[in-house]
Image: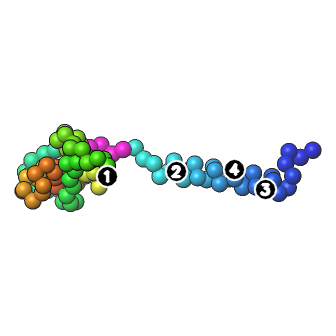
Amino acid sequence: MRAFPGKVRNMVNGRLVMCVAASIALGACSEAPRPLPAVVDAKAVEHCAFIGRTIGDPVAGKDRAPVERSVREEQARTRAAALGATHIVWDTSGNFHADTVAAKVYRCNTP
């Protein structure tokens, strides 16, 4: 005696295959978080590749509550890590809102 009739068996097998495929795909897409880039001075990144800039927002959430500076710095470093940065230099140029933490992002070849 069969466990499922033909159409039901095909549907169950199809869903099983889709679930397994989705699980594999999701697992392949996830990766370990990248380490946070080192905070250095401008001299330390003279021979590094400039990637861009990133910021840590002064407010967060729907109520726009103020965020502590350490949290903003962590946010900027996390965003830099997502860009593949190994090092950042805090940007003190004054081109940003006073409460915004800004950083120049670099990728350095480290030994």
Most foreground residue, 31 or 103: 103
Q: Residues within 10 Å of mark 2 (few under 14, many from 20)?
A: few
Q: Amino acid at mark 4?
A: Leu
Q: Which mark is residue 10?
A: 3
First reached walking from the N terminus: tag 2 or tag 1 = 2
39 over 55 or under it: above or below? above
At horizontal 63% and vertical 50% (from top left) the residue drawn is 19
At horizontal 84% and vertical 48% (from top left) the residue drawn is 4
Disc 1 target residue: 82
The answer for how far apart the CA atoms under marks 4 and 2 are is 15 Å
Residue 66 located left or right of residue 11:
left
Q: Which mark is residue 15?
A: none
Check if residue 34 falls in the magenta segment. yes
The answer for how far apart the CA atoms under marks 2 and 3 are is 24 Å
First reached walking from the N terminus: tag 4 or tag 1 = 4
Residue 11 located left or right of residue 24:
right
Where residue 93 sits in the image (x, y, percent)? Answer: 6, 56
Disc 4 target residue: 16
* Farthest-out residue, front: 63
The answer for how far apart the CA atoms under marks 4 and 3 are is 10 Å
Q: Residues within 10 Å of mark 4 (few under 14, many from 20)?
A: few
Q: Residues within 10 Å of mark 3 (few under 14, many from 20)?
A: few
Q: Amino acid at mark 3?
A: Asn
Numbered range of the magenta stretch: 33-38
Disc 2 target residue: 26
Q: Residues within 10 Å of mark 1 (few under 14, many from 20)?
A: some
First reached walking from the N terminus: tag 3 or tag 1 = 3
Where residue 72 sits in the image (x, y, percent)? Answer: 21, 45
Q: Amino acid at mark 1?
A: Ala
Camera sees residue 111: no
First reached walking from the N terminus: tag 4 or tag 2 = 4
